[in-house]
Image: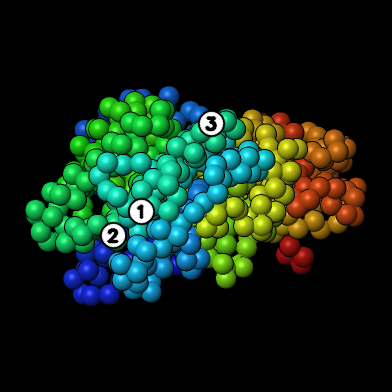
Amino acid sequence: MLSRRDLLKATGASAMAAGVSKVLAQQSGSSQTAPQSPTDIRQAQTRDQRMQWWHAARFGMFIHFGVYSTIGRHEWVMEEEAIPIGEYTAHATTFHPAPNCPRAWARLAKAAGMKYMVMTTKHHEGFCNFNTTQTDYCAPKQGPGRDLVHEYVEAARAEGMHVGFYYSLMDWHHPDGARCMTDEAARRRFVDYTHGLIREILTNYGKVDVLWYDVAWPLDANGWESERMNEMVFQLQPEIIVNNRNRLPGDFSTPEQHIEAAKNGRAWEACMTLNDSWGYQRADDNWKSSRTVIRNLIQCSRDGGNYLLNIGPKPDGSVPEESVRVLTEVGEWLQTNGHTIYQAELCQVRHSDYANFTRIGNTLYMHVYFWPGNYVALSGLRTKALSARLLKTGTEVKIAQDDFQTKLIGLPEKAPDWPLTTIAIECESEPIQDTLYVRENKPRAGV
């Protein structure tokens, strides 16, 4: 699936394409973001304290909801189908979410084992889901007739969720949203508008835990006045955390639609869709299975990252049935296995054809997603395994270990848990795997 950045790369005219390419190059990873600003240096002094809850949370819900939901053809439909502004904005009058629909989102997030939520306050389409004095193109003054962000905040807090706001800097609706690239007066108006909207969402809803910037096209950090932007953000919300998509490094990196651990111990969060669309796309039936979601969550936790998984509610605010089914299955698995995710530490062990791994202290958790039968084997575990048990049932598992292979034997032919079965392996010290040692030293026939 094309990411936001891939889609931007394909945008039309040559001047715009050149600006887009520059933007994407600067946004593509932590190694290519702007140097640390004075604000970021000050952030670093409180970062460990501010991010403590986030590191423990591991798993969050992303929500893409807006006017595009009424069209049901992906959140990029306005650009991808070149819908005229007047024709598109007319859909805002037909946007009628059911009252308090975010309550179902928050209940689902809690049932799925998620610990925080991030909702689109304004996506690229420019529609504000919150009450604002700066534009009439907002939920209270259009079809919804009320503040959807307020409903979301109340629902999230009622379920004990940390509250995050997504905000798209790019704006396809505002008349200065593109011409600010070449017109200084337009840039001044649009930056003031943008800073004003951010000030409102961080002033009117109490404590906000995450500000999740998105696409910074067509300006750089100086153009957006991102240093001043972040300074305002932290004045309003001293304990907030921010990502890296306003052209400053922020507190964490944001790989999209793939899992990639940040370097040098930097915090990171992989954001992904449940199908191939962020906003509601009625024809998109390419749903991830609960097994795939759990495998992704394990991989993020293994490498010290978070997993932000998206739902795209229908126009009435209800969650697609497949999203509910998958997330419910994930939550059921986490009821037994959740501590292996939430308490996970960096895990060096990772090589298997049918399992992945997390670690807590000296305990290695082998998460078997393709159950092979009455034994599992692990190559190159250089740490002595003292004992093992099936996490679901507590049943002890016998171990046969030599210099090259650790074999867990006498397992049931059928997996005792679904969609993954976890085996807890108590080790003598922190588990370390070296498969190259096996390749170089294991005796070979006739040699």
Label 1 to label 3: alpha-carbon separation: 24 Å
Q: Residue at x 20, y 37 (%)?
A: 228
Q: Earlier in the sequence, mark 3 or mark 2?
A: 3
Tell me if I can see residue 258 in this picture: no
Say how the picture is coloured. Answer: rainbow
Identify residue for label 2.
173
Rendering coords of residue 377 (x, y %): 77, 52
Nearer to us of marks 1 and 3 is 1
- Relative to 324, does residue 363 appear above or below in the rendering? above
Q: Which amino acid is tagged 2?
A: His
Q: Which amino acid is tagged 3?
A: Arg
Label 1 with label 2: CB-CB less than 8 Å? yes
Identify residue for label 3.
157
Residue 6 sits in quarter: bottom left
Rendering coords of residue 310 (x, y %): 53, 52
> Relative to residue 236, is residue 116 drawn left or right?
right
Label 1 to label 2: alpha-carbon separation: 8 Å
Label 3 with label 2: CB-CB less than 8 Å? no
